[in-house]
Image (cartoon, rainbow, N blue to C red):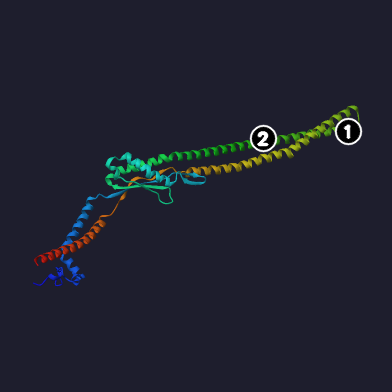
């Protein structure tokens, strides 16, 4: 009976040991014929790999990312807002101290190797992300670990933040005290100005009265001069002249106060008031800056509280099945050729034995 595959006669399929090198050459058609002949081997291996992949998908629980994002507190260094502690230093503490301590406190025995945490920091930021991967059944343990790590960071950095806040508060209180002093000085200067105005009115009234008295004495002296000269009249004239000179001195003194001393005092008080207003404005601006700096201070806090991210991680079931199919096809082809090789090897050994 003719062979089903003419190109593969018995001699071609089972070459003798003394066949020539030309007989060892295999064409692509021969390879294809082998694959077609061993198609059930290929299909079986492929099906087995797909079933194994499907079983892995069904048995393996989905993995999740557990994560917390921590903002390192920021305080002022000079006029620049800086992290309380360099991020690299905090990262080192987390990796070398905080995570091991948290794992020791919450895990024991064989569970120590099942929960892994790692910390990283986005470049150029004061954020630190602490994360781990596990199943849904491990959620409570991962959340406890993340919370414990955050508490250790906060406990470590909070004293320095409190010190910075207290320094800012002392600066604000000092600025407020200085502003109150300036306001008190302004009130005092304003009182001095009011008293000076009152004194000015008194001096003006006194000057008017002295001038009136001086005018009356001059009129009396003129009356005496018009009369006949007598001893009594001469004595009265001498007294009037003395009184007139006294009043003239008083008028000169009062005029000097109104024209020189009082304006000088007024200018000095007004100058102090003007400078006081400038100082108060400057101090209020300084207090606003202090308030702004105080508001800019940031404590160490959890930007993202410890939680399980909603999306599962790892290779999806479709990808796993696709990879299983590709692997199964490759193994099936290999198994087909290996089966063909074993068949031919057995045939050659049998033929050699019969000869």
- Determine which residue is flagged by label 2: 195
The image shows residue 121 at horizontal and vertical percentages of: 40, 49
State the image quarter where residue 329 is shown. bottom left
Horizontal placement of 46 versus 297: left or right?
left
- Determine which residue is flagged by label 1: 225
Looking at the image, is mark 2 or mark 1 earlier in the sequence?
Answer: 2
Looking at the picture, tell me which residue is in the foreground, 335 or 183: 335
Residue at 43% across, 40% down: 158
Q: Secondary structure at mark 2?
A: helix
Residue at 17% across, 60% down: 44
Marking on residue 134: none
Looking at the picture, tell me which residue is in the foreground, 327 or 344: 344
State the image quarter where residue 192 is shown. top right
Cα distance, mark 2 to mark 1? 44 Å
Q: Quadrant of the C terminus?
A: bottom left
Residue at 67% across, 35% down: 195
State the image quarter where residue 46 is shown. bottom left
Q: Bin the neighbour count of mark 1 within 10 Å (Cα to Cα): few under 14, some 14-19, many 20 and up.
A: few
């Amino acid at each position: 009976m003719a062979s089903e595959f003419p190109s593969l006669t018995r001699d071609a399929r089972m070459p003798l040991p003394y066949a020539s090198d030309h007989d060892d050459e295999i064409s692509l058609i021969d390879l294809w014929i082998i694959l077609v002949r061993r198609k059930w081997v290929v299909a079986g291996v492929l099906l087995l790999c797909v079933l194994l992949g499907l079983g892995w998908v069904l048995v393996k629980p989905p993995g999740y990312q557990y994560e917390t994002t921590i903002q390192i507190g920021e305080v002022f260094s000079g006029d620049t807002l800086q992290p309380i502690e360099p991020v690299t230093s905090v990262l080192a503490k987390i990796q070398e101290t905080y995570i091991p301590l948290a794992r020791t406190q919450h895990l024991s025995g064989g569970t120590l190797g099942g929960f892994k945490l790692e910390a990283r920091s986005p470049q150029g930021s004061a954020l630190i992300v602490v994360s781990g991967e596990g199943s849904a059944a491990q959620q409570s343990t991962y959340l406890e670990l993340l919370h414990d790590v955050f508490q250790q960071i906060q406990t470590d950095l909070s004293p320095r933040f409190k010190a910075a806040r207290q320094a800012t508060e002392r600066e604000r209180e000092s600025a407020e005290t200085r502003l109150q002093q300036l306001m008190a000085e302004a009130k005092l200067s304003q009182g001095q100005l009011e008293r000076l105005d009152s004194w000015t009115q008194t001096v003006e009234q006194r000057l008017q009265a002295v001038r009136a008295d001086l005018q009356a004495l001059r009129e009396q002296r003129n009356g005496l001069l018009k009369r006949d000269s007598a001893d009594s009249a001469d004595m009265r004239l001498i007294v009037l002249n003395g009184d007139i000179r006294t009043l003239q001195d008083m008028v000169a003194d009062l005029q000097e106060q109104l024209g020189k001393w009082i304006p000088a005092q007024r200018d000095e008080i007004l100058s102090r008031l003007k400078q006081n207003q400038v100082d108060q404005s400057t101090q209020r601006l300084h207090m606003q800056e202090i308030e702004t700096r105080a508001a800019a201070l940031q404590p160490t806090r959890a930007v993202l509280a410890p939680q399980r991210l909603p999306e599962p991680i790892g290779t999806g079931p479709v990808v796993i099945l696709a990879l299983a199919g590709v692997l199964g096809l490759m193994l099936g082809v290999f198994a087909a050729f290996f089966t063909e090789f074993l068949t031919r090897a057995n045939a050659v050994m049998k033929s050699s034995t019969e000869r």
